[in-house]
Image: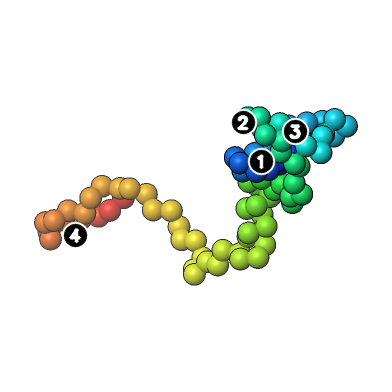
Amino acid sequence: MPTYEFRCSSCGPFDAVFSMREVPAATACRCGSPARRGITAPRLGSGASSAMKLLDATRATAERPAVVGAPAGRARHAGAPAPSNPLHARLPRP
């Protein structure tokens, strides 16, 4: 169901949910004053779903693609630390 914005003269704007068939031109505010329905822009992109996040990320990379400075290097494996004794440098390595 759509959310409509109403404006109270004393309280200011507030949102109310009505079906499209039953939306009134005016409704009562919490304070009891009449509030008129306002004209606002539709909130089509205000979703927080994973689909909206994916669309936003796709749109952002289409305009500003990530630029890589160099090709990806080979993965380095964490091996044994280098020995500090200079005589070990002459030993054969596996």
Mark 4 surroundings: few (<14), some (14-19) or many (≥20) residues within 10 A:
few
The amino acid type found where label 2 is placed reads Cys
The residue that mark 4 highlights is: 89
- Residue placed most toward the observer, 47 or 64: 47
Please state the horizontal and vertical placement of residue 23, each as a whole percent of the image. 82, 34
In contact (CB < 8 Å): disc 3 and disc 1? no
**Front label number (4 vs 2):** 2
Q: CA distance from mark 4 to mark 2?
A: 85 Å
Q: In the image, what residue occupies the spot 43% across and 53% down?
A: 75
Q: CA distance from mark 1 to mark 4?
A: 83 Å
The amino acid type found where label 1 is placed reads Cys
The residue that mark 2 highlights is: 31
Q: Is 18 left or right of 75, judged from the image as shown?
A: right
Q: CA distance from mark 2 to mark 1?
A: 9 Å
Would you place residue 32 above or below residue 55 in this image? Answer: above
Q: CA distance from mark 4 to mark 3?
A: 86 Å
The residue that mark 3 highlights is: 27
In contact (CB < 8 Å): disc 2 and disc 1? yes
Please state the horizontal and vertical placement of residue 12, each as a whole percent of the image. 61, 43
The amino acid type found where label 4 is placed reads Ala
Q: In the image, what residue occupies the spot 71% across and 41% down?
A: 5
**Front label number (4 vs 3):** 3
The amino acid type found where label 3 is placed reads Thr
Residue at the far right in the pictured view: 21
Mark 3, secondary structure of its residue: strand
Q: CA distance from mark 3 to mark 1?
A: 9 Å
